[in-house]
Amino acid sequence: MTSLLRSLDLIVHEVVRFRLSRCKDKSLLFELDIDGKDVALSKFKGKALLIVNVASKCGLTSSNYSELTHIYEKYKTQGLEILAFPCNQFGGQEPGSNPEIKQFACTRYKAEFPIFDKVDVNGPSTAPVYQFLKSSAGGFLGDLIKWNFEKFLVDKNGKVVERYQPTTSPFQIEKDIQKLLAA
C-alpha cells in the first residue's frame, strides 16, 4: 500500500510539474528536495544562485563537491545559494537513491547547500528548472547539458548570467560570484 501511495504522489507531482513547466511565470516553478518535499524556487528570490547538476560517481565529483562546499560556506551569509540537482543521465554516475545521495554529499563533503530530487536535465522529462536554464543560456552543444557538474550562475533577479562547462572549477568562477553578490 505504501508503494502505491508513493507512486500516486509521484504521478501527481509530475502532472503539476508538467503544468508549471508550461507556465509563463517562472517564479511559480518548484522542485522536490532530496527529502521529497516541494520547494518553491521563488524561495530563493533576491539571492545569487549557482545551480549545478551533480553526480556521486563522476571523475569530477570530489573536486566539485569540495569546492562547492567551500564556496557555499564562504558566501552563504552574503546571499549565495547553491542548488544541487542529482542526475543519472551521464554514464549512470548517480545511481543512488535520494537517501544515499544525501548521505554521500552531507557526510563525505559536509554539503549544507540545498540538494534536490534526482532529475533529468536533457530529453523529454527535463525538469522545469533545467528547461528554463537551458532556454536562457545555450551552451556548446546548444541547449543540451554536456555532462555532470555543468553550472549556471543566476543573479538576484532570476536572470541567468553565465553558463559554465563541467570542467570549470567552482573556484574559477568565484570572481563572477563576488561580482553578483556585490551588485
Image (cartoon, rainbow, N blue to C red):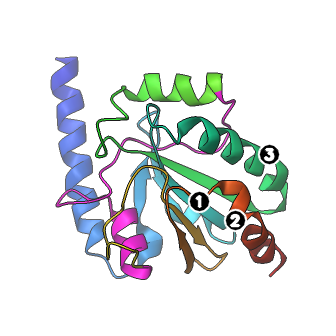
Q: Residues within 10 Å of mark 2 (few under 14, many from 20)?
A: some
In which quarter of the view is residue 17 placed? Answer: bottom left
Give the position of the N terminus as an image quadrant. Answer: top left
Instruction: Tell me which secondary structure the magenta stretch mostly adopts.
Output: loop
Drawn side of residue 148 relative to residue 84, left or right? left
Is disc 3 placed on a helix, strand or loop? helix
Residues at marks 2 and 1, CA–CA distance in whole angstroms:
8 Å
Is residue 61 depicted above or below 128 in this figure? above
Q: Which residue is mark 3?
A: 73
Asked whether disc 2 touches disc 1, contact meaning CB atoms under 8 Å apart, the reply is yes
Query: In terms of depth relative to the viewer, which is nearer, 91 or 96?
Result: 91
- Residue located 41% across and 36% down the image: 36
Q: Say if 80 sits above or below 137 in the image.
A: above
Image quarter hosting the C terminus: bottom right
Residue range of the region highlighted in magenta in the rendering: 109-137
The quarter of the picture where residue 131 lies is bottom left
Q: Check disc 1 and report the residue beneath it.
A: 168
The residue where tag 2 is placed is 173
Mark 1–mark 3 distance (CA, rounded to whole Å): 19 Å
- Image x and y of residue 156, in percent: 67, 75
Could you say where residue 132 lies in the image, as x and y percent from the top left? 39, 73
Q: Is 60 in front, or is 75?
A: 60
